[in-house]
Image: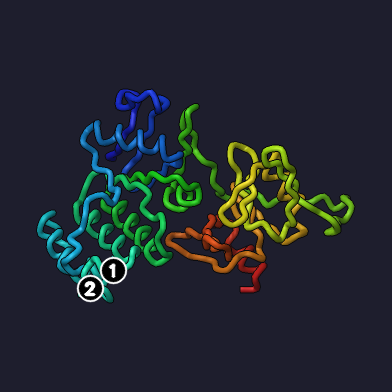
Amino acid sequence: MAHFIIDNEMIDSEHLPSFSLTIEDFHATSIYSDTDMQAELVKVLRNNGKIPVFDLQDGLYERLTVEENIIFYQKWFGCKIPIPEILVLFELQTCAKTPVYKCSESEARRVHFARYYMSGGYPMVFLEPIHGIDIRTTNTFIRMIEKIKDSSIPVLVLVSNMEHALLLGEVAYKLQEKGIQQIEVDEGEEQATTDSSAPPMTTNLFKIPVKVDDKMILFDPPEIDYIESQDGKAMIVINDQSYAMDSTLGEMEKKLGVYGFYRCHRSYIVNLQKVREIITWSKNTYSLRIDNKLQSTIPLSRTKIQDIQEKFSL
């Protein structure tokens, strides 16, 4: 069984902690970190073993059509997959005759994915592959990962968004100054139990207090899009703003259950009133799309899909 290893000997940077990570073939692993640490890790990978990192910096031929780009790179990389199959796999049939410079950002990203896929690299390392693209293109990338894994090629995805890390990696890690730590995921997580002897909760005058600088801000529960766990603490997310709390996710789950909030994943509580769409990706991978300014997507545990379908009477 082949594998790809990042070890302490490779990491020669004062900006990165020492760590070791093994990625087996047939597997996709994601690493979530801030952009500075991410850049250092990319530098390490490129300086050791000449590992290619697919970061969208390799330009396409913008004056050529999508199909002409695919034909060129198929010959360049000696790829044996027929052109029509590539166009279908990356959902490029409708824009095949369009020059790349006239394509949308998501269409151009799918051409990039096709280029990377035909290169046949080993391992395949992707940097922020689904940042700023539509759901259709994200789904295309996930399907591509499945095909890469079927070819016994290890996949590493580097992201600065925890939702993306949980979506794209079978195993997800968080890289910080103190080291690397696996992000817990749900596998048969037990449902939270309620104490029947507890007094009934009331919705009267309930606010969520958050301290920002020297001010205390009070939020109404309906304002909140979702709550995520970071380093054991709860972070309230409202549109593109996050607010730290002293409470844990478990404590917030108990307080907000009566207001229509639901623990959709070990690391997330969602306001069900803000859910616009349940997205099915592949192989029992799901997300919830939130009706907010950013159209945020957050992970939905595979163990919770039936429960949430029942809540929406689907």
Task: Pick the quarter of the image with the C terminus.
Answer: bottom right
Q: Secondary structure at mark 2?
A: loop
**Residue 1: percent from the left, percent from the top?**
28, 40
Residue 55, compared with residue 91, is above or below; it is above
**Residue 231: percent from the left, percent from the top?**
59, 37
Badge 2 is on which residue?
98
Badge 1 is on which residue?
103
Let me know if residue 266 appears in the view. Answer: no
Is 13 positioned to the left or the right of 273 in the image? Answer: left
**Residue 274: percent from the left, percent from the top?**
63, 64
Residue 30, compared with residue 47, is above or below; it is below
**Residue 10: percent from the left, percent from the top?**
30, 27
Look at the numbered discs 2 and 1 and tell me whether their residues touch, using CB distance below 8 Å.
yes
The residue shown at (61%, 52%) is 237
Let me know if residue 149 appears in the view. Answer: yes
Crowding at dot 2, Cα within 10 Å, few <14 / some 14-19 / many 20+, comes out as some
Residue 4, compared with residue 139, is above or below; it is above
